[in-house]
Image (cartoon, helix red, strand yellow):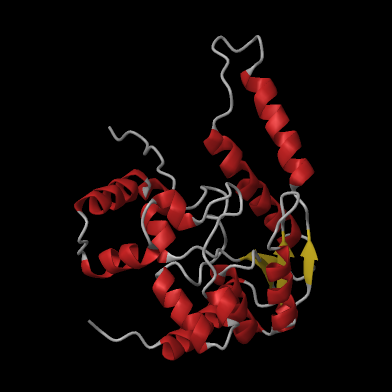
Amino acid sequence: MKKFDAKQEALHMIEWIRAWFEANGRTATAVIGISGGKDSTVAAKLLCEALGTQRVFGVLMPNGEQADLCDAERVAQHLGIPYSIVNIEKAAANTMDCILHAVRSPANAQPWEASEDVRINLPPRIRMAVLYGIAQSFPGGGRVANTCNRSEDYIGYSTKYGDAAGDFSPLSHYTVTEVRQIGHAMGLPADLVEKKPSDGLCGKTDEERIGFSYEVLDAYIETGVCGDAQVKEKIDRMHAANLHKLQLMPACPKRED
């Protein structure tokens, strides 16, 4: 297996970002949601190196109180980029009220309660709407960065039309292990690069929710080998069930006579 050279990969990613913006937004600002985790931190650093700090705008989007909001602010201040804090709590609560009203409406023959998945996935979708609203407000145009990595995408650990959306994706071909190596190679604060991933919504880390570590997942993605048969089966099942998130929306072709 080819040795992973984090420094060279970072340079490659920076050049890719420059080329993408040259073709898709010469004057556009890169708009990125910053959580304080490794993915948004690494992606924001790459954007700064590729475009300069004045063409990168960070958006911090707590849902009410966010215990690690200081980490997100620290990222923006460390990189020296302009940023804004948009608290989505009211928007999320009002939208949830609308959903509950709809499903409990007498017009609904079989009313039901909104599931826990609805409550978990609604905030990321609101955050993406905020990012696009901000991006479309820049005079020179804005482009929204997707910050998902290959490991998350492989098992579908993202919200469709939420954090899985975006105009371009610097990290989607890189595993969690590789993203961390790139972060260290670029000199980012080690505690942020090694911070345990969490969606910040359910009170658990990613690994607690999915039931296995990213180290195990990354090794399986790279080698196809997993020593635990139950974990392998779960990874395969999650991957198959979530392939639709990685594919363009299918469209029914016109009938040909």
Q: Is residue 3 left or right of residue 245?
A: left
Check the image and report above or below for 233 versus 176. above
**In this view of the protein, which residue sits in the foreground, 245 or 112?**
112
Left or right placement of residue 58 versus residue 254 in this view: right
Frontmost residue, 103 versus 67:
67
* Quadrant including the C terminus: top left
Judge whether residue 158 can be spotted in this image: yes
* Front residue of 138 and 41: 41
Is residue 247 among what the camera can see?
no
Q: Residue at x 64, y 46 (%)?
A: 123
Quadrant, the N terminus: bottom left
Relative to 137, is 100 on the left or the right? Answer: left
Residue 32 drawn at (x, y percent): 65, 66
Taking the spot 75% from the left edge, 45% from the top edge, the residue there is: 89
Q: Residue at x 48, y 70 (%)?
A: 171
> Residue 172's spot in the image, x, y percent?
44, 67
Indicate whether 153 appears above or below 161.
below
Residue 233's spot in the image, x, y percent? 24, 48
**Is residue 224 placed above or below 205 in the rendered structure?**
below
Residue 154, percent from left and from top:
36, 57
Numbered-mark total: 0
| Quarter residue 132 falls in | bottom right
